[in-house]
Amino acid sequence: MSTGFTCATCGAFHEGHPLCYGPSAPEIWYTIPEAERESRCELSSDQCIVDDKYFFVLGRVEIPIIETGEEFVWLAWVSLSEKNFERTCELWEAEGRETETPCFAWFSSALPYEKTTLHLEAILHTRPLGERPAIELQECDHPLYLQQRDGMSLAELQALTERLMHGQGTGKNRYT
């Protein structure tokens, strides 16, 4: 992969391309007033419960980078039914959990695409212990699905990196 790029936004040279970004909470968490979050939400680095009725896990949307053989990863939150969330939690520390049947999920992160990524249909695939689950978007005409299916070019990666580095995602600089 290239050693870096000159940013079209700030004009500076940036070493390499960061290959993983994602919000630290599902989108609904950001809509709850800060003063209420502690009483209404449980948030860890991988799981979130809101109002004891919305259940989320953090997973990976993997996008091939066409010219390099590497991949860009969106860390993203998906909502699960209470039953599927409980099952996911039961298996969280279990060896062999990757044999679990994948489950339906709703995409719950507002990633910086022109079309909203909220509520896209997805399948959550449990991975071996120590690995975050994989998020497989279901077929649709959304650019995120098309990138997951077809990959992204280095030029697309650079444009995305520039927007994220300069807080130009959804108007909120919440991607790390």
Image (cartoon, rainbow, N blue to C red):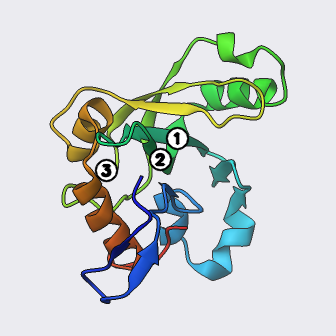
Residue drawn at x 77%, y 28% as measured from the top left: 129
* Mark number, residue 73: 2
Indicate which disc, 3 or 1, sits on the residue closer to the N terminus: 1
Residue drawn at x 65%, y 32% as measured from the top left: 85
Tell which of 9 and 61 is nearer to you.
9
Residue 46 shows in this picture = yes
* Mark number, residue 60: 1
Kind of residue at badge 3: Thr
Q: CA distance from mark 3 to mark 1?
A: 14 Å
Measuring from the top left, give residue 92's x and y in whole percent. 78, 30
Outermost residue, left side: 141
Q: CA distance from mark 2 to mark 1?
A: 6 Å
- In the rendered view, does 117 fall on the left or right side of 91? left
Measuring from the top left, give residue 13's x and y in whole percent. 39, 82
Res 136 → quadrant: top left
Measuring from the top left, give residue 94's x and y in whole percent. 84, 22
Q: Quadrant of the C terminus?
A: bottom right
Measuring from the top left, give residue 45's x and y in whole percent. 71, 55
Q: Which residue is mark 3?
A: 117
- In the rendered view, does 111 fall on the left or right side of 24? left
